[in-house]
Image (cartoon, coloured by chain):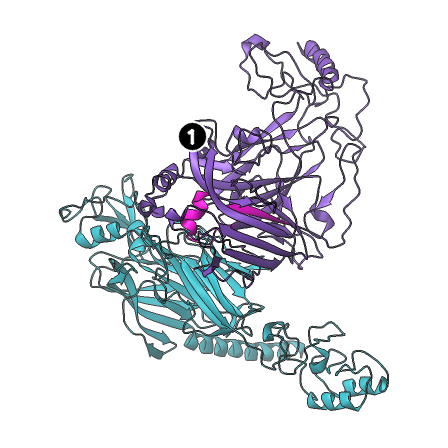
Chain colours: A cyan, B purple
């Protein structure tokens, strides 16, 4: 008997699992159709820098296709993987004059013929996958399988995990990443939740990088590298490698600071108020360390390289070595304009004296929904005016919006009984309006919250 | 030889109390100005570097309020020492030569600063309000020191140039949280003090490590009136300073007349079993892997926030152990360091068989049960004096508080028989001053015999 039940149950379970897999499979493929191509960036001093970048042509989530704008950008548009999805494919079309490959640092690429080896003395490919047997002079050109010029090739990550990551070129990265082949890739654990327990209301993705324009001109002009195809123009020299790279411009999201530019403020299209929890995804696609530092505020460091910390840390500056990612939450409690800048002091455009480089501003508006002069992020009742902020049971819900006397999450009959038991006493917790007596006024407040949770409170996320 | 060494050790220990002849001078406190209102003036002056160079600097001077007694510019600026809960006001005027065309300001990362008390002629800058170079208009930076800890202040005006030029300093906020420090267990130790509001942040001595760099070419251009030619993207520092001095200058006394614009030194001292608090500040633009010999340390705070899993009650339970810490621009850290003699493998007091252990002085893993190194001989037999070349901090003896025979030409800089542990940047080129070794970011912690007083 027991066995039979178990058997039948197993059958049901198996079919359920099968169904689950099917449902999961139908949703679990996210495909980004991208193009690598050339573009330019114009610096605040009008210098035009040749760049390579990524265009997002379309996003296909389980068959639902959203077109991108198809414009080559530096950095590329952030690739947003929906929560719960585990299979990510990038289908890359290469419009650059040389092979390109892709890596997402911290994610496992499904092997498909990488690395690509060349003879040490030329660009001739001598092997894919492993080092050619007995050949000690072969060199890796690409960490992953390549997309040839004019070709389209897929890259698959079959076990994608949530977090903030950098998509970088895996081919001659000392050249191609510098040229601009980088983008952010992000995934939340649930809508509006970056990591378990870390919810946010607004999100800013900040990609840091540097530019040496001489090197870019050499790449564009064909006189960069060990085997340049063109002689340098008059007044220029061939640049054999990035060894002597000397960054002149310091970029956030492809922009160097100028007054009124895209970093002034950096949240121009994303209004932030004192009721928001802002997730800053900080990614360093450059080759130097940068230390984003905020003034008049602290940030809370949640995660590094896509890995959540067991305990978040308060910092006013975040150390970002090359290729590092960090996620921080900012919960503003005062309004104003907050400088967010590189504490390594790369705050110049090519050495001029005006403020420039990795300087950005975060504009924060005052939001005090109930108008009780306590901003929402500090207000223990954001919808009920309570300037005194009484919270006698210390649960971060002010008494005015906390009729849940037994702290079971809802105001219901039990709470009415508790209130009845202390009626006409000075019980502090049941004295919702703070008039030192539990009376009819408190009953009216409880009625408003009947079958409702306490709050909302800015102190309880 | 061992016997002779031993006898001499005893003799010299006795002599030492008479002949307190120090090669280096130290203070067991962080030098600075205590108060709640500070009047600072940006000024131009010179510092001296160990290679003999005089370098033009800009720095913050402290005006004590007495007419006609304006202090000189100092590098780094005055260490401002306040108490938690204080409302702190820093007033800044700008007496830099107007020809440079430089406004000046201060940013206080980690503080919420109000500049509304500034004079009408103060101007809005990129990061904060600025004082124009007229010597009259001032910016008033006001903030409440809500949290104890170590903080940095730097110029917020063209900081890539002005921080290089010397406009940096330290801010220390002492806790007033009503937490009682632990009781002292060593008879020779001073009372504990607290770095943060938790007993696990207690220390005996505190020292500051404020790190900066100098690229002399930038200073030359400024000196020659060619400030427009300064390009901070091709910056190449050749001097590395701790508290505004480089080795060996940083071993001299604080406020030494040789260094009228570099008042602070860096000579940490301690005894066995005592806890040293090091306040770490990356005030410049470079990363510096500072390496602390002798024992591991415990990092208890970063950016003025104790590393606590629950916001404070648990103490610095997220602290980590290390022997190298990367000084990061704009960042501060606090760590605790203690030397016990554990696992050193010989008796640092050179006891003879039959001697009783020096309770409270010698390492014991089980609080007095055993003394594993007691009477254990020094593991090698030292060569004769004239067969060796000595460093200037060698006392002549491997035993703590003891001395031995030194050659006639030896400078004898360690007359207390202390142990010198190098604390230095492990980016080894930073141990030079303009390409001359030794120099730069090279310091020591001096482990003194328990009976040697630490001033």
Q: Which residue is mark 1?
A: B53
- Disc 1 is placed on an element classified as loop
- Closer-to-camera residue (B114/B401): B114
Report if residue B159 lies within the magenta region. Answer: yes
Output the chain of dot 1: B
Residue A453: % across, % down: 67, 82
| The N terminus of chain A - image quarter | bottom right
Height in image: B161 above or below A433? above
Residue A162: % across, % down: 48, 65
- Closer-to-camera residue (B345/B266): B266
Local crowd size for mark 1, using a 10 Å CA cut-off: few (<14), some (14–19), many (≥20): few
Q: Is residue B213 left or right of residue B335?
A: left
- Closer-to-camera residue (A33/A191): A191
Q: Residue at x 58, y 30 (%)?
A: B256
| The C terminus of chain A - image quarter | bottom right
Residue A72: % across, % down: 27, 66
Q: Residue at x 47, y 47 (%)?
A: B95
Residue B109: % across, % down: 54, 55
Height in image: A285 above or below B223? below
Height in image: A112 above or below A81? above
- Closer-to-camera residue (B150/B43): B43
Q: Does residue A313 appear in the picture of this structure? A: no
Q: In the picture, residue A208 is in which quadrant?
A: bottom left
Q: Residue at x 72, y 34 (%)?
A: B273
Marks counted in the figure total: 1
Q: Residue at x 29, y 53 (%)?
A: A171
The magenta region covers: B154-173
Q: Is residue B197 left or right of residue B107?
A: right
Q: Does residue B264 appear in the picture of this structure? A: yes
Height in image: A142 above or below B117? above
Report if residue B144 lies within the magenta region. Answer: no
């Amino acid at each position: 008997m027991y066995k039979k039940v178990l058997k039948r149950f197993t059958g049901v379970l198996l079919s359920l699992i099968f169904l689950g897999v099917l449902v999961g499979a139908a949703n679990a493929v996210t495909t980004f159709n991208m193009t690598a191509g050339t573009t330019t960036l114009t610096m605040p001093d009008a210098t035009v820098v040749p760049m390579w970048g990524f265009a997002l042509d379309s996003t296909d989530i389980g068959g639902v296709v959203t077109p991108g704008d198809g414009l080559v950008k530096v950095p590329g548009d952030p690739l947003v993987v929906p929560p719960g999805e585990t299979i990510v494919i990038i289908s890359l079309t290469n419009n650059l004059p040389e092979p390109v490959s892709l890596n997402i640092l911290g994610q496992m690429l499904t092997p498909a013929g990488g690395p690509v080896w060349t003879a040490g003395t030329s660009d001739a490919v001598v092997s894919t996958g492993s080092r050619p047997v007995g050949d000690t002079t072969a060199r890796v050109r690409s960490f992953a399988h390549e997309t040839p010029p004019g070709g389209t090739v897929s890259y698959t990550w079959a076990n994608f995990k949530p977090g903030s990551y950098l998509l970088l070129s895996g081919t001659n990265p000392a050249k191609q990443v510098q040229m601009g082949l980088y983008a952010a890739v992000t995934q939340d654990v649930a809508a509006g939740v970056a990591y378990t327990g870390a919810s946010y209301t607004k999100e800013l993705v900040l990609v840091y990088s540097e530019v040496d324009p001489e090197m870019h001109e050499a790449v564009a002009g064909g006189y960069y590298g060990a085997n340049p195809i063109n002689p340098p123009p008059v007044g220029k020299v061939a640049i054999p490698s990035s060894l002597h790279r000397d960054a002149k411009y310091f970029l956030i999201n492809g922009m160097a600071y100028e007054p009124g530019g895209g970093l002034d403020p950096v949240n121009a299209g994303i209004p932030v108020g004192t009721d928001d929890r802002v997730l800053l995804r900080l990614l360093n696609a450059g080759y130097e360390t940068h230390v984003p530092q905020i003034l008049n505020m602290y940030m809370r460091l949640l995660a590094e390289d896509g890995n959540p910390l067991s305990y978040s840390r308060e910092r006013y500056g975040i150390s970002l070595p090359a290729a590092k990612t960090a996620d921080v939450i900012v919960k503003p409690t005062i309004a104003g304009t907050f400088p967010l800048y590189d504490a390594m002091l790369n705050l110049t455009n090519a050495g001029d004296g005006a403020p420039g480089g990795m300087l950005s501003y975060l504009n924060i508006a005052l939001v005090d929904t109930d108008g009780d002069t306590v901003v929402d992020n500090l207000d223990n009742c954001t919808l009920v005016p309570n300037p005194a902020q009484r919270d006698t049971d210390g649960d971060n819900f002010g008494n005015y919006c906390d009729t849940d006397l037994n702290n079971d999450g809802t105001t219901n009959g039990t709470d009415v009984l508790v209130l009845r038991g202390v009626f006409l006493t000075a019980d502090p917790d049941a004295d919702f309006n703070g008039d030192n007596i539990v009376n009819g006024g408190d009953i009216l407040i409880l009625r408003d919250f009947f079958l409702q949770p306490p709050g909302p409170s800015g102190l309880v996320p | 030889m061992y016997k002779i060494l031993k006898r001499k050790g005893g003799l010299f220990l006795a002599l030492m109390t008479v002949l307190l002849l120090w090669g280096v001078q130290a203070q067991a406190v962080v030098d600075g100005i205590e108060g709640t209102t500070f009047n600072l003036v940006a000024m131009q002056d010179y510092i001296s570097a160990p290679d003999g160079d005089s370098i033009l600097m800009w720095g913050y001077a402290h005006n004590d309020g007495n007419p006609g007694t304006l202090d000189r510019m100092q590098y780094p600026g005055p260490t401002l020492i306040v108490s938690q809960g204080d409302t702190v006001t820093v007033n800044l005027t700008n007496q830099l030569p107007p020809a440079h065309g430089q406004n000046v300001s201060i940013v206080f990362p980690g503080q919420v600063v109000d500049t509304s008390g500034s004079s009408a002629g103060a101007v809005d800058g990129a990061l904060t309000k600025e004082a124009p170079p007229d010597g009259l208009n001032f910016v008033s930076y006001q903030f409440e020191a809500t949290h104890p800890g170590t903080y940095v202040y730097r110029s917020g005006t063209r900081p890539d140039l002005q921080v290089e030029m010397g406009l940096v300093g330290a801010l220390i906020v002492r806790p007033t949280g009503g937490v009682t420090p632990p009781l002292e267990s060593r008879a020779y130790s001073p009372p504990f003090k607290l770095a943060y509001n938790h007993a696990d942040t207690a220390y005996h001595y505190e020292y500051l490590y404020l790190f900066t760099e100098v690229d002399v070419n930038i200073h030359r251009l400024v000196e020659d009136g060619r400030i427009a030619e300064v390009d901070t993207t091709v910056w190449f520092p050749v001097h590395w300073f701790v508290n505004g001095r480089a080795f060996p200058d940083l071993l001299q006394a604080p406020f030494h007349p040789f260094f009228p614009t570099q008042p602070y030194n860096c000579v940490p001292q301690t005894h066995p079993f005592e806890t040293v608090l090091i306040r770490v500040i990356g005030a410049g633009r470079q990363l510096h892997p500072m390496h602390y010999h002798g024992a591991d340390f415990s990092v208890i705070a970063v950016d003025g926030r104790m590393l606590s899993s629950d916001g404070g009650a648990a103490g610095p339970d997220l602290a980590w152990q290390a022997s190298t810490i990367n000084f990061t621009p704009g960042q501060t850290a606090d760590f605790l360091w203690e030397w016990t003699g554990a696992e050193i493998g010989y008796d640092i007091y050179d006891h003879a068989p039959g001697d009783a252990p020096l309770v409270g002085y010698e390492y014991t893993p089980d609080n007095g049960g055993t003394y594993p190194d007691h009477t254990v001989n020094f593991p090698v037999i030292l060569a004769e004096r004239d067969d060796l070349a000595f460093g200037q901090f060698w006392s002549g003896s491997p035993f703590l508080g003891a001395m031995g025979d030194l050659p006639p030409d030896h400078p004898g800089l360690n007359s207390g028989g202390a142990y010198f542990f190098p604390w230095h940047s492990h980016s080894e080129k930073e141990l030079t001053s303009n390409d001359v070794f030794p120099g730069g970011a090279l310091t020591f912690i001096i482990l003194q015999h328990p009976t040697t007083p630490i001033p």
